Image (tube, rainbow, N blue to C red):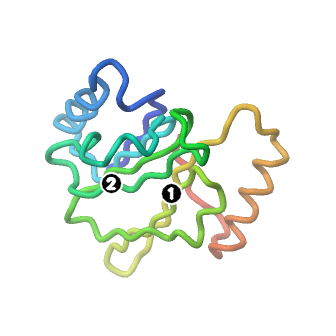
Amino acid sequence: MKFFHWKLNSLCARGGLKKQLILVYDAVYKYDIIAVSESMLDSTIKNDDIFIEGISKDIYRSDHPSNTKIGGVCLYYRDKLPIKRWTDLELLQEMIVSEISLSRKKIILATLYRSPSQDSEHSSTIYSSFLMFSGMKTPIVLY
């Protein structure tokens, strides 16, 4: 299982160059999941606009709630990957929680954007709530 996370600062910037860079990285490493934070998408940008050939037909995304091009996250995944989204675990507006089933194991993957203006106490509360709600004792954290 190969994961890739990129704090991108706008998926559509520079005429789609960053989408092409994701495609190049994927050609080399063959990622199963590609998570993007600071996707900076709004309702004017459709999934077809950010589709990356050969990675996935569907994209999970969680744009900034004000519908402005700031923050936000999106998740690309291989079509063959047994993944489903858990919206009931999404405790923040800019968060995607998904479950990946592999044999008899399940992996819970959370991709989120936390604004630098949020204080650490707010982050700790969200983190603790997520652990309690998901039933996890010790999560695997990828940076």
Q: Considering only vertical position in the picture, is 83 above or below 73?
A: below
**What is the quadrant of residue 129 in the picture?**
bottom right
Q: Secondary structure at mark 1?
A: strand
Name the residue beneath numbered marker 2. Answer: 59
Residue located at (52% from left, 51% from top): 111
Q: Amino acid at mark 1?
A: Ile
Amino acid type at image mark 2:
Ile
In the rendered picture of this protein, how many numbered marks are placed on residues?
2
Where residue 15 appears, as percent x and y from the top left, is 28, 21
Q: Is residue 51 left or right of residue 60?
A: left
| Image location of residue 127, percent across then percent down | 71, 56
SS at badge 2: strand
- Who is closer to the viewer here, 137 or 119? 119
In this picture, residue 126 sits left or right of residue 67:
right
**Residue with the mark numbered 1:** 96
- The residue at 36%/41% (across/down) is 45
| For the residues bearing labels 1 and 2, Cβ distance under 8 angstroms | no
Vertical arrangement, residue 78 with respect to residue 131, above or below: above
Residue drawn at x 44%, y 73% as measured from the top left: 106
